[in-house]
Image (cartoon, grey):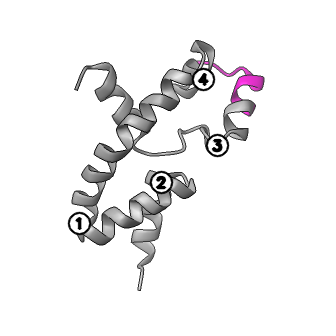
Amino acid sequence: ETSPELMVWIGQVSGFWAFYVQMAGTMLWTCGEIATAENEFLFQARPRFGELWRALKEKERSAMRGETTRRGTLDLLRRFGLLRADGQPFSALFFEAIDELEDGA
């Protein structure tokens, strides 16, 4: 049985994207606890998050960082599922992965 805490965590890291939901569930299943699963999820998702980031135009990256309020850009990012309704990235781990990629980690 899946606890509400685990379901919330899966939603936070996956943004409810089917691919990442499956990945998060697999990490929980194999790792057995959230902290370890989160580290493994981040390791596995980092390359794809980097691809998503590099595919964005600079104005879209700026909007993802919360540096602009251009409605059209924000609406587009929400429509594609990259931003949640509250303006945050779809995954709570997205910027952690991007920051590490840009730092050369």
Query: What residue type is disc 2 on?
Result: Tyr
Local SS, label 1: helix
In the displayed structure, 74 sits above or below 27; it is: above
Say which label, 2 or 3, has the lower sequence index.
2
- Magenta stretch in the rendered image: 67-75
Q: Is residue 51 left or right of residue 64?
A: left
Say which label, 3 or 1, has the lower sequence index.
1
- Between the residue at mark 3 and the residue at mark 4, the CA separation in whole angstroms equals 13 Å
Query: What residue type is disc 4 on?
Result: Ala
Q: Residue at x 69, y 29 (%)?
A: 74
Q: Residue at x 46, y 65 (%)?
A: 8
Give the residue pinned by disc 3: 81
Give the residue pinned by disc 4: 63
Residue 60, horizontal then vertical, whole percent: 61, 21
Say which label, 2 or 1, has the lower sequence index.
2
- Mark number, residue 22: none
Local SS, label 2: helix
Residue 53, horizontal then vertical, whole percent: 49, 26
Q: Quadrant of residue 34?
A: bottom left
Give the residue pinned by disc 2: 20
Local SS, label 4: helix
